[in-house]
Amino acid sequence: MISGMLSPLGAPRIAVLGAGHVGPVIARVAIDAGYHVSIAASGDPGKIALITRVLVPGAEPRWAADAVSDADIVVLAIPLHKFEAFDHALVADKLVVDTMNYWPPIDGVREMFEDSGAGSSEIVQDRLHLSTIVKTLNHIGYHELEDERRPLGSRERRALGVAGDDPGAVAVVAEVIERIGYDAVRLDSLRAGRLLQPGGPVFGVPLGRTAFELATRVGAA
């Protein structure tokens, strides 16, 4: 655990859906911050048991339905192309953190996300209409997420945006972001989460809180 970070007391339980590149890193930093974390792939948890022990010690590999049912926060860290077949009922009534990006040069053109009038997380919210979506962790590289953490008060502490339409849900996720080692900048809508997407003013850019807030204000103007 990073010096200066405290384990959360009565912390929410986190389920990470996705055991590729992104999911295990998110699971590791959450465990390091004191959270209970389950991780699930698309099938039998036995198939990811070994990789979980090696890459995410402390995480519990589970069937997706079981991981979600016990979780307070569900992190959606699957490849975007798999979202088209994602069962929306799996996360009904759950707080879901959307870490996905629509990036045609990487993902190819995905018709579902081609609505130029909506951000990708707005489209995710429309599809997962029984869930509460919060967008974050999408504008920092998974390979940076672990290394860029800093304790509270550090001058080198980086800011991450947290966007959502539900202020209570945003507050819960912002607390997680703060505890894993980043300053959380709350954006008041999923629409504002477009600023965090590829091509947005803060995507992939390591900024402190003040610079981040300025960049998002300028980007929204």
Image (cartoon, rainbow, N blue to C red):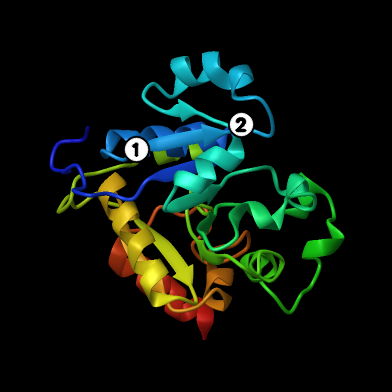
Specify the label residue 36 is tagged with: 1
Image depth: mark 2 or mark 1 in front:
1
The amino acid type found where label 1 is placed reads His
Q: Position of residue 105 (x, y in %)?
A: 77, 49
201 with respect to 217 (left or right): right
- Which residue is depicted at the point 48% across and 58% down? 136
Measuring 47% from the left and 79% from the top, which residue is drawn there? 218
Q: On screen, 193 above or below 160?
A: below
Q: Nearer the viewer, residue 107 or 180?
A: 180
Which residue is denoted by mark 2 in the rendering? Answer: 20
Q: Residue at x 42, y 41 (%)?
A: 145
Label 2: which secondary element: loop
Above or below: residue 118 compared with residue 59: below
Vertical comparison of 9 with 161: above or below = above
In-image side of 72 versus 39 (left or right): left
Indicate which disc residue 185 carries. none
Q: Nearer the viewer, residue 211 or 39?
A: 39
Asked whether residue 180 appears in the rendered view, the answer is: yes
The mark total stands at: 2
Asked if one can make out residue 147 in the rendered structure from this viewpoint, the answer is no
Circle 1 Cα neighbour tier, 10 Å, few/some/many (<14 / 14–19 / ≥20): some
Q: In the image, is residue 149 above or below residue 158?
A: above
Foreground of the two, 36 or 181: 36
Q: CA distance from mark 2 to mark 1?
A: 19 Å
> Can you say which quadrant of the picture contains the N terminus?
top left
Q: Are marks 2 and 1 in contact (CB under 8 Å)?
A: no
Q: For the residue marked with disc 2, what is the amino acid?
A: Gly
- At 54% from the left and 30% from the top, the residue drawn is 62
Instruction: Work out whether mark 2 precedes mark 1 in sequence or the reverse, and give the earlier one.
Output: 2
Q: Nearer the viewer, residue 106 or 112?
A: 112
